[in-house]
Image (spheres, helix red, strand yellow):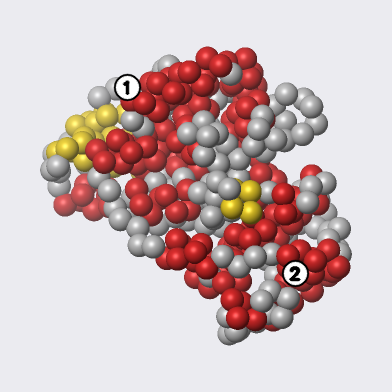
Amino acid sequence: MKPILRPAVPTTLALLLAACGSSEQPITSTPNAADTDPLAPLLIPKVNLPAPDVAQTGYSAHPDVQAFVAERRNQGRGLDEGSLKAFFDTAGYRGDIIRLMDKPGTSRPWYVFRNNNAPAARITAGRRFYQANRAAIDHASAQYGVPAGLIVAILGIETNYGSNMGNIRLADSLPTLAFGYPRRAAYFRGELAEFLQLAAEEGRDPQSFSGSFAGAMGMPQFMPSSYRKWAADGDGDGRRDIWNNVADAAASVANYMKQNGWQSGGRMAVPVTLTPTPELSALMERKTEMDHTVADLKRMGVMPQETVADDEKAVLFRLETAPGEYRYFIGLNNFYTVWHYNNSRLYVMAVRDIALGVGAGGL
């Protein structure tokens, strides 16, 4: 993959997990208009603020919802005003979701995060899951050039291999967040628009979708925009069923990684040695950007413990392996690709640990 910066694209319930696992704040992007492409991201409707509380007005009487309906109708993407109004007439408001979104996150050290997200039991379960679904996962791995162990690891850390995908109706969660959560309203209105378009494209009743309280869906916990961009038909049956079909879920994860820059055969992280300095400490505290080369870091006293090309882009970080004890690493291209799936360095390294435990080598 070419070593360039890419905008972060939130994909999963990662929007929330990152806040719990890292001091980094999740990076979000908003859809762009491209009316000539029916699968292009959608415009975020204009809103009128300030507005009354949707919990008191209900959706249909809320001016921002009315503006949303008018905007969608004017875009002419197959969602008529009647169907939109019917959707909001049956959408539920979930105040408990707002409380969950506002719950303060805590920064956890690596040794706690790893025990919670990549314990031995999850790695063992991953081996069993891989053995039971080897043909489908290996097919996705070969098609997209992404290790089978990495595919398994993403499905494991996101939903414990499909056993915990969330049971909240998206017809309740997304409207609640789009019109009752001002801090992230723009993002969730975009996801709601993507969701309604997704349901129309798939020929499904929007009331039939369920997922996490943040609107993430299926085994890989794709947000609606991510589903429309990257969900894949892994078994050729003409559907993209990331809820019940392991072949589709595996192909979707692999397609996401490939389209976001996964480099076949490349590594995710390499251990390094260094003597901590104020310069290096400040560098490790910066947000995750691939704006240094390995050669740059070597000049600062960072010594990779494996062979790495000097011109590779890298990010320096540390893991607290025990209270007050640290190991240091550089994250390479494939580290950055997985980081886009969830904007947390701890998440990426937990995925790597599961993948290595399942049998992926060279990560």
Picture residue at 46% right of the left edge, 45% below the top: 342
Picture residue at 36% right of the left edge, 52% below the top: 20
- Percent across and percent down for residue 351 are 41, 33
Residue 35 is marked as: none
Sequence order check: which comes first, mark 1 or mark 2? 2
Picture residue at 40% right of the left edge, 50% below the top: 18
> Foreground mark, 1 or 2?
2
Picture residue at 43% right of the left edge, 16% below the top: 359
Amino acid at the residue labelled 2: Asp
Badge 1 marks a residue whose secondary structure is loop
Residue at which label 1 appears:
307
Q: Locate residue 86 relative to residue 358 in the image: left or right.
A: right
Residue at which label 2 appears:
89
Q: Are marks 1 and 2 in contact (CB under 8 Å)?
A: no
- Percent across and percent down for residue 140 are 62, 23
- Rate crowding at label 1 as few (under 14), some (14 to 19) or many (20 or more) other CA atoms within 10 Å: few
Q: Locate residue 122 relative to residue 5 in the image: left or right.
A: left
